[in-house]
Amino acid sequence: METTIAIIVALAVVAALALGAYWYWQGQRLTSRLKEQYGDEYELALSEQPSRGDAERELLEREKRVQGLQIKELTVEERDRFVEQWRIVQVRFVDDPAGTIDEADDLVQKVMESRGYPITDFDQQAADISVDHPAVVSNYRTAHSIAMKHEKEGASTEELRQALIHYRSLFQDLLGAVPVG
């Protein structure tokens, strides 16, 4: 009888250890996938959340939200129209750097909206974009930050140029890497 109880207890311990190892392994796989997919955005989520688990839940919630959206590719006509509008923005930069930053932001938002991303507040837009465009969402955040700085206290022409470059990288990614000059 004692031998049977000892075997049952040993099997329960082994099963618990196996289950714990499996959960740990699954957690590590999830962490690796999220780090690889989101890169800098993963690190940002870690810095904004109280724990790794909270940060990873936030990223998974973003994925779930974006999966529920009707994201679509642009038509050739839409893409061509946006590329032409972008070229105009870039040309205007020489004469009106501050104004073109607003235009670049507006154009990026129009592309997002045409693709099916909801246009809400900046933080939600950046979170939504991070799911499908994680490599360039930091550019979007930087461009927006420069634009906000310019509204409040002014930004140098070089900072505005950097903002335009950052907007362009997101713009190109949203279009599907169509070269825009």
Image (cartoon, rainbow, N blue to C red):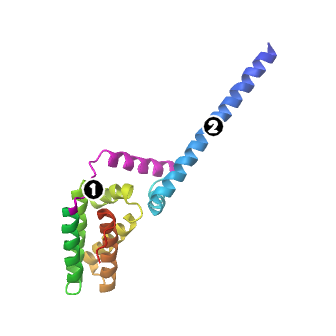
Residue 31 place in picture, x, y as percent: 53, 51
Q: Is residue 28 above or below residue 123?
A: above
Label located before the other in sequence (1 or 2): 2
Residue lying at 18% horizontally and 63% vertically, measured from the top left: 77
Residue at position x 46%, y 63% in the image: 40
Q: Which disc number belongs to residue 168?
A: none
Circle 1 Cα neighbour tier, 10 Å, few/some/many (<14 / 14–19 / ≥20): few
Residue 110 on image: x %, y %:
21, 63
The residue that mark 2 highlights is: 20
Q: Residue furthest front?
A: 76
- Residue drawn where x is 28% and y is 72% of the image: 148
Name the secondary structure under disc 2: helix
Q: Nearer the viewer, mark 1 or mark 2?
A: 1
In the image, residue 71 above or below residue 167: above
| Residue 115 among those drawn in magenta | no
Which amino acid is tagged 1? Glu
67 left or right of 86 in image: right
**Boundaries of the magenta span:** 51-76
| Left or right, 144 with reference to 77 | right
Give the Cα separation between the discs numbered 1 and 2.
43 Å
- The percent position of residue 108, horizontal first and vertical second, equals 25, 66
Q: Quadrant of the N terminus?
A: top right
Q: Position of residue 3 (x, y in %)?
A: 81, 17
To which residue does mark 1 refer?
73
**Type of amino acid under label 2:** Gly
Residue 143 location, quadrant = bottom left
Main SS of the magenta part reads helix
Is residue 52 visible to us here? yes
